[in-house]
């Protein structure tokens, strides 16, 4: 079974802090994704990566950056956290670029910015 | 503009009966549609998918129907069980940039009453 592990289940940070969310997958997947989930809005794509050091913006990249130095690890960075970034963050991975390959999700990090 | 819509935020069904979850989309370029199930405090898990060239896909108690002319898909669960109680997300897949990406609906909370 695919295992996507997010380093923290719950995180509380202060406005203006630099925040790192870490994600690791154990199935040698090429693609990794970061989403945020908010009530009434579903899951929205922040950034994705299709190879080591390769990244592309998703639908809501403002205020975020990402890093993928190793194939198994994909980090989401909040450069200067703001209260409107309080959310559930979900990491996902998929094997290939084929549309029929489902994405596999971690259990999420609930981030609160005070 | 929401390209994937789930207009029912919640649905309540008796155990043993059929659950029907609906999803509408606007973009004809989507090539796969997927359903994910999400329990509280867990990440979404892939349930079933359908190619845009098919109109039905079945996997055990779960069947997805696609009506391309109406840009509508539905997930049928028969018979419904209490363990099916979860949030169900519809997602549409398209090839954008370097890999396939998903657009999610806002989710439907299914409650199966014993």
Image (cartoon, coloured by chain):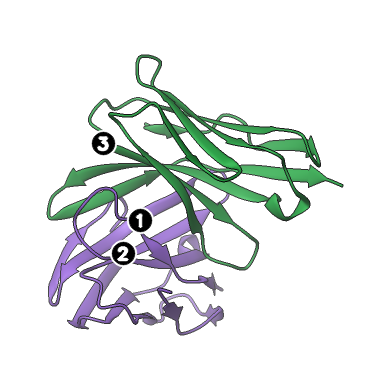
Chain colours: A purple, B green
Above or below, comparing residue A37 to residue B96 in the picture = below
Which percent across, then down, holds residue B40? 65, 62
Q: Earlier in the sequence, mark 1 or mark 2?
A: 2
Q: Are marks 3 and 1 on the same chain?
A: no
- Residue behind mark 2: A33
Asked if one can make out residue A29 in the rendered structure from this viewpoint, the answer is yes
Occupied quadrant, residue A90: bottom left
Q: Secondary structure at mark 2?
A: strand
Occupied quadrant, residue A104: bottom left
Q: Is residue A75 left or right of residue A113?
A: left
Which percent across, then down, holds residue A54? 12, 70
Q: Quadrant of the C terminus of chain A?
A: bottom right
Above or below, comparing residue B73 to residue A106 in the picture = above
The residues bearing labels 3 and 1 have C-alpha atoms spaced at a distance of 13 Å
Q: Closer to the camera, B17 or A59?
A: B17
- Crowdedness of circle 3 by 10 Å Cα count: few (<14), some, many (20+)? some
- Residue behind mark 3: B31
Above or below, comparing residue A103 to residue A2 in the picture = above
Mark in front: 1 vs 2: 1
Q: Secondary structure at mark 3?
A: loop
């Amino acid at each position: 079974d695919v295992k996507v592990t997010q380093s923290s289940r719950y995180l509380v940070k202060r406005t203006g802090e630099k925040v790192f969310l870490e994600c690791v997958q154990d199935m040698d997947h090429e693609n990794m994704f970061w989403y945020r989930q908010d009530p009434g809005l579903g899951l929205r794509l922040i950034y994705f990566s299709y190879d080591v050091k390769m990244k592309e913006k998703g639908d809501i990249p403002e205020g975020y950056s990402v890093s993928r130095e190793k194939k198994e690890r994909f980090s989401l960075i909040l450069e200067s956290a703001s209260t409107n970034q309080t959310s559930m963050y979900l990491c996902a991975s998929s094997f290939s670029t084929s549309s029929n390959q489902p994405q596999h999700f971690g259990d999420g990090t609930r981030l609160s910015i005070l | 503009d929401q390209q994937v819509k789930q207009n029912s935020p919640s649905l309540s069904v008796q155990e043993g009966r059929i659950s029907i979850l609906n999803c509408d989309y606007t973009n004809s370029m989507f090539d796969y549609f997927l359903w994910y199930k999400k329990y509280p405090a867990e990440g979404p898990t892939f349930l079933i998918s359908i190619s845009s060239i098919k109109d039905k896909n079945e996997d055990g108690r779960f069947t997805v129907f696609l009506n391309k002319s109406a840009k509508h898909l539905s997930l049928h669960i028969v018979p419904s069980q209490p363990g099916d109680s979860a949030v169900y997300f519809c997602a549409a897949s398209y090839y954008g940039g370097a890999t396939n990406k998903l657009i999610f609906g806002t989710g439907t909370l299914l409650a199966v009453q014993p």
